[in-house]
Amino acid sequence: MAISSLGLGSGVLTQDVLDKLRRADEATRVTPIDLEIAAVKDEKAALSVLDAKMTNLADNINALKSPTLYDERTVSVNGASVEMRASANSDIGDFGLNVTQLATKQIEESGSFTAPTDTIAVAVGNLNLNIDGQDFTIDYTDTTTLKELKKSINDVAGDKVNATIVQIASGDYRLFLSSVDTGTTQDITIADNSGKLSGTQLTNDLTAIQRGIDAEFTYNGQKITRTSNNITDLITGYDITLKSLGTSTVKVDQNRDAIMEKINNFVTKYNDAMKELKSLTKNSTDAKERGIFTSNSTIKGLQRALRMIMDKAGGGVATIYDYGFDIAKDGTLSIDKNIFNQKIDENTANVEIFFSGGDFDNGDGTTTAVDGVFTELYTQVDAYIGFNKTLDSFQMDLNTKVSTLQEHRLDAIERLDNKYKTLIKQWSVYDALIAHLNNSANTLMQMINIQNTQNN
């Protein structure tokens, strides 16, 4: 900090006096700009919060306006004989499944070998493994062991058969071949193409210890046969797994919980947005309670638009209040789950169309094309959010306003700097002049005092 000599001569035109004058000037020229910048920054912060809430609302509405919302399914099974999943938009209904036979794999057992290291052939050659009508060629040599043959089978034909070696007793090892799939088509045979196998354990001695058989069950009393216990071709979208013998009843229904979860989320997001708008536009004589956008037509317009669309949406065929929605006096939105579900029970298709769009059945043989409540809501909200939309433009205007005010502030400070640089120069001259006059006056007084003393 520079040390000022201003005022040393006069004792009047001091730096402290200049500082006080500077602060007084700043209070009238700079401080109002600082207060205005702070106010605009507060508006920007408030607008960012509102924009986030509106974006959350729009995202939730966007998820609701799709008809696929109503396609999700739930499955309930009474009984342990089956398990089932139902994909979106699959048939709704209930039925009985009586499992009378589970599909099994084909399992073959070879003749006995004394050890896994026993060689299987006397010379180079190959054998043919056939399963489910498909041939696989397995090469061997005079050094190929049972263990190596097992590996070769798994490497070459592992998609269709699993090979393992099992020790039955001391000195009794056997090759087991198990089909990957189930059903009556899974027969397994081995033929020696080259005639070089050292015994018949893999050919003539190959014995079926479990036959592959088809699954058998009844669907609502109709007998059904399949090669697998996993049934995906009975009804489109149904994935049924047969688990055990016995009867089960299955019910496929619309996933009301998933629908209601998204409806509840919408209600929450709507109330969050409206609560924020209410706070931002609150009119009060108390400055602490008054909303920051009380006089702003853009934000108040958004508040009115959201409230009005809730009353008008529906394409003229109904209102959201007919479907269990309600808005209290304080503006809070709610949903009556029972009324909503009752509407779905009465006419599922009309509920989907009313909220997502389509041809609404008027019940008199005529239809009315509607955009869908949530499409209408989304259109209204989308007009305010997003790039270059209303709120984005408002935010850019505030940014521009802050930049302009900051420029004005810099200009004001520069003018004050120039003013006080000039004052310092002027005051320095005045200070020197006053000092000179003071010195002259002191000299004159001394001369007068001397003259008076001599006269006395």
Image (spheres, grey):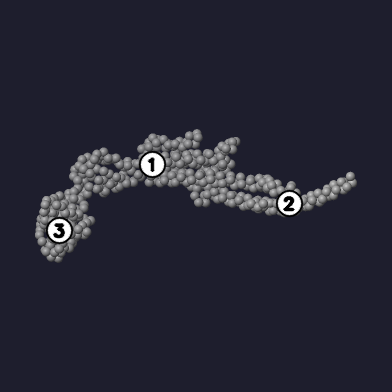
Disc ID at residue 259: 1
Of residues 38 and 302, which is closer to you in this image?
A: 38
What label sits on residue 427 in the rendered view?
A: 2
Q: Which residue appears at 60% of the width and 36% of the height?
A: 285
SS category of the residue bearing label 3: loop
**x and y percentages locating residue 30 in the rendered image:** 64, 47
Q: Nearer the viewer, mark 2 or mark 1?
A: 2
Check the picture and name the quadrant holding the C terminus: top right
Image coords of residue 175 (percent x, y) = 15, 55
**Rendering coords of residue 383 (x, y %):** 50, 47
* Residue at the disc numbered 3: 117
Q: Amino acid at mark 2?
A: Trp
Total count of labels: 3
- Answer yes or no: do the residues labelled 3 and 1 have beta carbons within 8 Å? no
Q: Residue at x 50, y 48 (%)?
A: 385
* Label whose residue precedes the other's in the sequence (2 or 1): 1
Q: Residue 129: in sight, yes or no? A: no
Is disc 3 surrounded by few (<14), some (14 to 19) or many (20+) residues within 10 Å?
some
Q: Earlier in the sequence, mark 3 or mark 1?
A: 3
Is 201 left or right of 421, judged from the image as shown?
A: left
Label 2, residues with CA under 10 Å away: few <14, some 14-19, many ≥20: many
Q: Nearer the viewer, residue 414 or 315?
A: 414
Residue at the (24%, 40%) spot, across then down:
80
